[in-house]
Each structure stands twice: as structure tokens, then as C-alpha cells.
């Protein structure tokens, strides 16, 4: 595992690793995440091994812009307006998945989508394209943010980490949008304020 910084040249290196189907860790606005190319089944399997997670729970798909959301989801007018209101931000939306995508991206017709509000991530996503991004940790263990500990645990599994100190924060708020809105997990943005936005549409 090599340690990169947030310079343009290092972000390009990270994007090349990702396009090769390798795993790269990087900071988000909430915790460190680990990303892989969304359409590489090989990379997806490597992510499962790192997370020690059985492949029945899909990962969040991180996108670089709101305009990309329609490529992966089936949205009615109200849901689309809601997406435009809350993205980018510390929110993950569970939305009806579009047909024709790899099966491992979704479960029961639902896909998790996030557009981060973090310049480093947005720049990386422009270079790499959409990524599957869970938090950097083994399943059922807390997220990691200490470089020494990350090296010790993941040195053989990560190709690189873009390392910068981050302020530990709450994870993203998760909402399910189908025929109605449902709170799946409270997080950084209060769900009450998000539901209020949805109800006004």
C-alpha cells in the first residue's frame, strides 16, 4: 500500500489504481472509505474479502454529480426533485434501481446512492468514475482513521490510501425512497429536516 496526498497528481495515481480494479482508501466528509470500480466484479469480490462481508448486502454507489443519479435509478418527478435538493451532502438514498445493471449493485430492486459534499471525493470521482464505497473497516468493527493502524490492518489489501487528517463525524443519514419516505439510519443530517424537504415537494 502506498500513501498518497490530495494533490492532482496523486489523485490521478489513485484513479489509475481504481480503473485497474484495485482498492483505494480515501477520506470522506464523515469517515475514511474504501473504494472500487462499480462495474468490476473482480474488484467487488476483493472489497468483500477486505470487509469480510458476505455478498448479500450491496455497497453504496458514490457518484460525482447529481446528473449521474438517473443513469442508475428509476425516479419519479418528486423523487428526482428531492435528489436535486439533498445532493451533494451527507445523505445516502435507497432508490429503485434501473434495469440492466450488475446484480451485485442492488438488492430487492433497491440501490444505495450517495453524492458526497467533499471536494477531494468529487475530484477523485471525476477521474475514476462511479465507485462502490463502504467505510474502511472490517464488518461489525468501527471505522478506522489512524494511518498506522490502517497500514497494519490493510497493507496487503489496499493498493493506496489518500491520507489526510479528518474530523471524526457522524455517518451519512440513510433514507429509503419508494412510494413513501422511510428513515433507515439517523446520521449527520437530521432526518426530520430531510423529510420536511420531501413533504414540501
Image: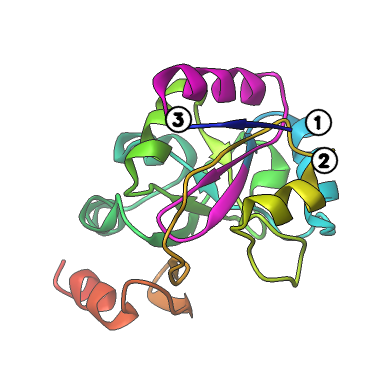
State whether residue 168 is above or below residue 150. Answer: below
Numbered mark located on residue 42 in the image: 1
Which residue extends farthest left? 200
> Do the residues bearing badges 1 and 2 touch, measured as CB atoms within 8 Å?
yes
Which is nearer the N-term, disc 3 or disc 2?
Answer: 2
Colouring convention used in this rendered image of the protein: rainbow
Quadrant in which the C terminus is drawn = bottom left
Which residue sits at x=78%, y=55%? 51
Residue 177 seen in the current view: no
Left or right side of 13 for 90: left
Which residue sits at x=45%, y=30%? 124
Res 166 → quadrant: bottom left
Q: x and y percent of residue 118 in the render? A: 34, 46
Numbered mark located on residue 91 in the image: none
| Dot 1: element | helix
| Dot 2: element | helix
Q: x and y percent of residue 125 in the render? A: 45, 31
Q: Was residue 145 drawn as part of the magenta stretch in this picture?
A: no
Reading the image, the residue beneath label 3 is 124
Q: x and y percent of residue 97 in the render? A: 53, 48
Numbered mark located on residue 45 in the image: 2
Q: How many marks?
A: 3
Q: Was residue 27 drawn as part of the magenta stretch in this picture?
A: yes
Q: Nearer the viewer, mark 3 or mark 1?
A: 3
Q: What residue range appears in magenta?
A: 6-34
Q: Give the spatial CA distance, label 3 vs label 1.
A: 21 Å
Amino acid at each position: 500500500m502506498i500513501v498518497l496526498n490530495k494533490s492532482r497528481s496523486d489523485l490521478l495515481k489513485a484513479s489509475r489504481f481504481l480503473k485497474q480494479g484495485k482498492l483505494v482508501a480515501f477520506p470522506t466528509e464523515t469517515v475514511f472509505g474504501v473504494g472500487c470500480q462499480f462495474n468490476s466484479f473482480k474488484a467487488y469480490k476483493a472489497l468483500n474479502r477486505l470487509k469480510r462481508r458476505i455478498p448479500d448486502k450491496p455497497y453504496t454507489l458514490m457518484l460525482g454529480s447529481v446528473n449521474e443519479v438517473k443513469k442508475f435509478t428509476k425516479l419519479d418527478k418528486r423523487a428526482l426533485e428531492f435528489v436535486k435538493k439533498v445532493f451533494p451532502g451527507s445523505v445516502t438514498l435507497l432508490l429503485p434501481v434501473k434495469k440492466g445493471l450488475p446484480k451485485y449493485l442492488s438488492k430487492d430492486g433497491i440501490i444505495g446512492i450517495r453524492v458526497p459534499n467533499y471536494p477531494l471525493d468529487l475530484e477523485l470521482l471525476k477521474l475514476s468514475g462511479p465507485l462502490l464505497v463502504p467505510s474502511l473497516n472490517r464488518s461489525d468493527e468501527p471505522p478506522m482513521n489512524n494511518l498506522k493502524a490502517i497500514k497494519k490492518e490493510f497493507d496487503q489489501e489496499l493498493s493506496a490510501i489518500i491520507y489526510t487528517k479528518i474530523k471524526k463525524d457522524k455517518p451519512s443519514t440513510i433514507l429509503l425512497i419508494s412510494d413513501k419516505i422511510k428513515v433507515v439510519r439517523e446520521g449527520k443530517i437530521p432526518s426530520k429536516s430531510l423529510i420536511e424537504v420531501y413533504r414540501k415537494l
